Amino acid sequence: SVPPGVLPLCRQLLAWGRAPRQPPGLPLAQCRAFSNNKIMVELDESSGVATMKFKSHPVNSLSLDFLTEFCISLEKLENNRACRGVIITSAVPKIFSSGLDITEMCGKSTEHYAEFWRAVQEMWLRLYGSNMVTVAAVNGSSPAGGCLIALSCDYRIMVENPKFSIGLNEAQLGIVAPFWFKDTFVNVVGHRVAERSLQLGSLHSAPEAHRLGLVDELVPDEKLQEKTGAVMAQWLALPDHARQLTKSMMRKAVLDRLVAHREEDIQNFISFISKESIQKSLRLYMEMLKKKKG
């Protein structure tokens, strides 16, 4: 017998165009799902494709809890031999991820800042260094840390909506993007575009992001799932070992740089975020957000 809830999930995966249709009457028992408070994970073992959907309302901010759940989910998929690729997307309308949770960086202890920043590092190390094919289905705005998640994937498809934006806009908040954010950005868009965008803290509209190479494709919202499934199938058609070794070769130097300087990077973050001028900027930004909500 098929566990309750499995069939609807499998049908949803089939609608994404990733799982082969089975003969009538056969149970779709190859579909597995596990969920936590902030992320829904669905794995279709027959196609080897998982979907991670962010569902941390209101804006999928990267809190310490979210980052912990993200790393656990990714590790589970990485350790499952049936899983070869993962699609990362959002279940929250109009937002992929708003980036790092400001409340984790404002008015907390140095111990908390260290724990939080280590979790941010871990998220990036796991995603950027993943052996799986990783495709970002960006179905909403994606500033700062949200942009980093998309940049860390192998391929980025964004909904063709001029109201959606993406970019590393840390400079607008008075924050400096760390070197490994910068390295990831440069590897995607090139040095000059990254330099200008980082200095200005630019948020690029979907069409502009495509023009700059920040995202690989734009599609209408109703075509996102179909296109993402097709792209994933194209990547999975290759032998895993050749693709994985090539990916490692291309990304190893950037990953090794953070690993070698991880503790130093944490101390730099603590020193920077603890400055009164930075705390003041963050408080003002949080007040501005509260007024907008009001």
Image: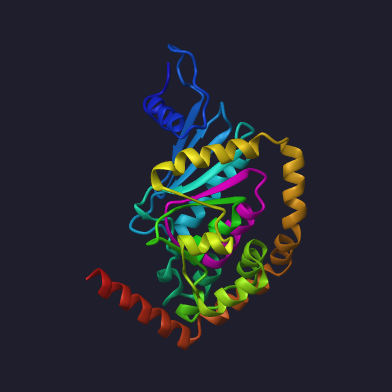
Is residue 262 placed above or below 245 in the rendered structure?
below
Residue at (74% x, 51% y) in the render: 248
Residue at (53% x, 24% y) in the render: 20
**Lateral position of residue 256 relative to residue 86, left or right:** right
Residue at (49% x, 30% y) in the render: 32
Quadrant of the frame with the N terminus: top left
Image location (x, y in percent) of residue 97: 44, 58
Color theme of the render: rainbow
Q: Looking at the image, which is closer to me, 266 or 33? A: 33
Image location (x, y in percent) of residue 73: 53, 45
Quadrant of the frame with the C terminus: bottom left
Q: How many marks?
A: 0
**Lateral position of residue 238 relative to residue 193, left or right:** right
Residue 131: say if magenta. Answer: yes
Q: Determine the residue located farthest toward the top in the rendered image.
A: 25
The quadrant holding residue 286 is: bottom left
Q: Determine the residue located farthest toward the bottom in the rendered image.
A: 277
Is residue 82 placed above or below 25 in the rendered structure?
below
Q: Is residue 230 visible?
A: yes
* Magenta region: 116-142
Q: Looking at the image, which is closer to me, 116 or 16? A: 16
The quadrant holding residue 254 is: bottom right
